[in-house]
């Protein structure tokens, strides 16, 4: 008997989660590990969010509820997107999901037929190619290159569009590079999407974590409202990773398909956490700006310190909370370097190839940890850097 469906042979895991598993194993052996592998803010929701959760449970909001998500939450998200992104969407455009990844998965399941081509950023979130493959689609990477400041190159993307291209995935600010797409790039992407009648999956999970400027959604550009699906949620912007709360903003012609998939899978998202999420959106204590302010300080310090490590080179990201470090000057491969960092220095980081072929010469650190932890990590890295110092290429 063939046990597993063939899609299981083409889907891939996530580098962050496998590094995390090995780091945990080392910790069980008594080793001290600094975890910079997971993209998880070291903040927690404010007291008012926790109170709202308790209140919702006490009020009996622990039943099956609306498949698309409870109306007050969908209304609150619509108004939040108006206030923070100047978007004109309504509750009817929204489907709540248990996490952004499920929102992404469902959106892709609703749209991709076998053979459909999906353009996605490389380096990029591993799910983009894995889910595409699992659905029988064809992932077509477009490169975010260092010499282009990790911005998508619309000309390169245009050259990759074929009659089978159905979806363009955008991720600004991006994981792992932290790039916030420029207005010029977004305008060109929107032009391409309209010209070739593409759907756009705009993964905006880091939209609130930017270091200056006003965030502009791809949905905002001419002709994009009817072809853009925004994926967003509470994991990063509200430091609620474990709450598993995400959502899709979709054009009316697509919403019923997302609801159909919800009916056939998760039914609805926990009612009490949806009510608590409404409180998170109000952000009465200013949790999100405070967190971003703190990340701003860490970003400056950590990027400066990492650049002191022989053979490391990185620029401050425009958004998200990752340092994306070019390590080619160390003369070592990223896998081997990350192995040394974890096994010898006790610092967990991810080899860049986990984010695609264009990430081969890079490693990713999350700087969503305290300043002292980040300083400690760099000290440890400097100590083991003796093993590659002799081979550092001159810049
Ligand atoms: C770009 C991007 N999209 C989606 C996700 C998934 O988010 P969630 O934890 O809400 O499922 C992540 C998580 O790291 C991410 O970086």
Image (cartoon, rainbow, N blue to C red):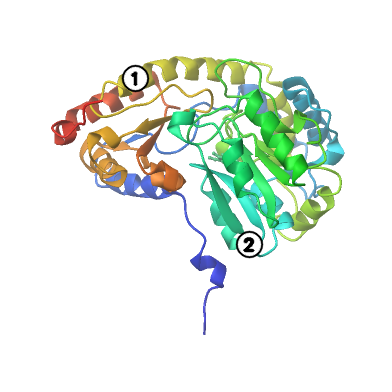
Q: Position of residue 55 (x, y in %)?
A: 72, 32
Ranked by sequence position, the earlier of labels 1 and 2 is: 2
Count residues near mark 1 (Cα–Cα under 10 Å), then give few for <14, some for 14-19, many for 20+. Answer: few
Identify the residue under disc 1: 372
Residue found farthest to the bottom: 1
- Which mark is nearer the camera, 1 or 2? 2
Q: Position of residue 158 (x, y in %)?
A: 63, 43
Q: Position of residue 20 (x, y in %)?
A: 39, 45
Secondary structure beneath dot 1 equals helix
- Label annotation for residue 135: 2
Secondary structure beneath dot 2 equals loop
Q: Is residue 142 left or right of residue 265?
A: left
Which quadrant of the view contains residue 134?
Answer: bottom right
Instruction: Please say whether residue 252 is visible from this viewpoint.
Output: yes
Front-most of residues 106 and 63 = 106
Which residue is painted at 60% across and 42% down in the image? 157
Q: Alpha-carbon distance for marks 1 and 2?
A: 43 Å
Q: Is residue 367 left or right of residue 216?
A: left
Which residue is painted at 51% across and 64% down in the image? 10
Report ligand 1 position as a quadrant.
Answer: top right
Which residue is painted at 86% across and 40% down in the image? 92
Residue 261 to residue 367: above or below? below
Q: Is residue 174 left or right of residue 232?
A: left
Which residue is painted at 13% across and 32% down in the image? 390
């Amino acid at each position: 008997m063939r046990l597993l469906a063939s899609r299981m042979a083409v889907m891939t895991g996530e580098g962050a989660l496998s590094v995390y598993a090995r780091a945990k194993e080392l910790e069980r052996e008594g080793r001290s590990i600094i975890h910079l592998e997971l993209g998880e803010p070291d903040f927690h929701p404010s007291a008012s969010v926790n109170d709202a959760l308790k209140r919702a449970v006490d009020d009996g909001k622990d039943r099956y509820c609306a498949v698309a998500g409870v109306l007050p939450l969908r209304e609150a998200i619509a108004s939040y997107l108006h206030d923070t992104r100047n978007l004109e969407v309504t509750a009817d455009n929204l489907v709540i999901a248990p996490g952004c990844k499920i929102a992404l998965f469902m959106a892709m399941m609703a749209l991709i037929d076998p053979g459909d081509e999906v353009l996605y950023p490389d380096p990029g979130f591993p799910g983009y190619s894995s889910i595409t493959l699992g659905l029988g689609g064809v992932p077509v990477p477009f490169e975010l290159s260092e010499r282009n400041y990790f911005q998508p190159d619309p000309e390169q993307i245009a050259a990759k569009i074929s009659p089978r291209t159905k979806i363009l995935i955008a991720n600004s600010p991006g994981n792992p590079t932290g790039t916030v797409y420029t207005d010029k790039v977004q305008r060109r992407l929107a032009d391409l999407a309209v010209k070739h009648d593409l759907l756009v999956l705009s993964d905006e999970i880091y939209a609130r974590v930017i270091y200056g400027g006003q965030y502009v959604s791809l949905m905002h550009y001419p002709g994009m409202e009817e072809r853009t699906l925004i994926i967003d949620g509470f994991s990063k912007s509200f430091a609620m990773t474990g709450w598993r709360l995400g959502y899709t903003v979709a054009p009316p012609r697509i919403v019923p398909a997302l609801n159909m998939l919800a009916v056939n899978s998760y039914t609805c998202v926990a009612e009490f956490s949806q009510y608590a999420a409404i409180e998170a959106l109000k952000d009465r204590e200013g949790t999100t700006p405070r967190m971003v302010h703190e990340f701003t300080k860490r970003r400056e310090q950590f990027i400066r310190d990492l650049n002191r490590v022989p053979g490391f080179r990185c620029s401050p990201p425009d958004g998200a909370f990752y340092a994306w470090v070019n390590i080619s000057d160390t003369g070592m491969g990223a896998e081997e370097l990350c192995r040394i960092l974890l096994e010898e220095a006790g610092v967990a980081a991810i080899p860049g190839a986990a984010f695609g072929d264009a990430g081969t010469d890079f490693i990713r650190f999350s700087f969503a940890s305290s300043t002292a932890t980040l300083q400690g990590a760099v000290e440890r890295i400097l100590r083991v850097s003796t093993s590659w110092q002799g081979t550092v290429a001159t810049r």
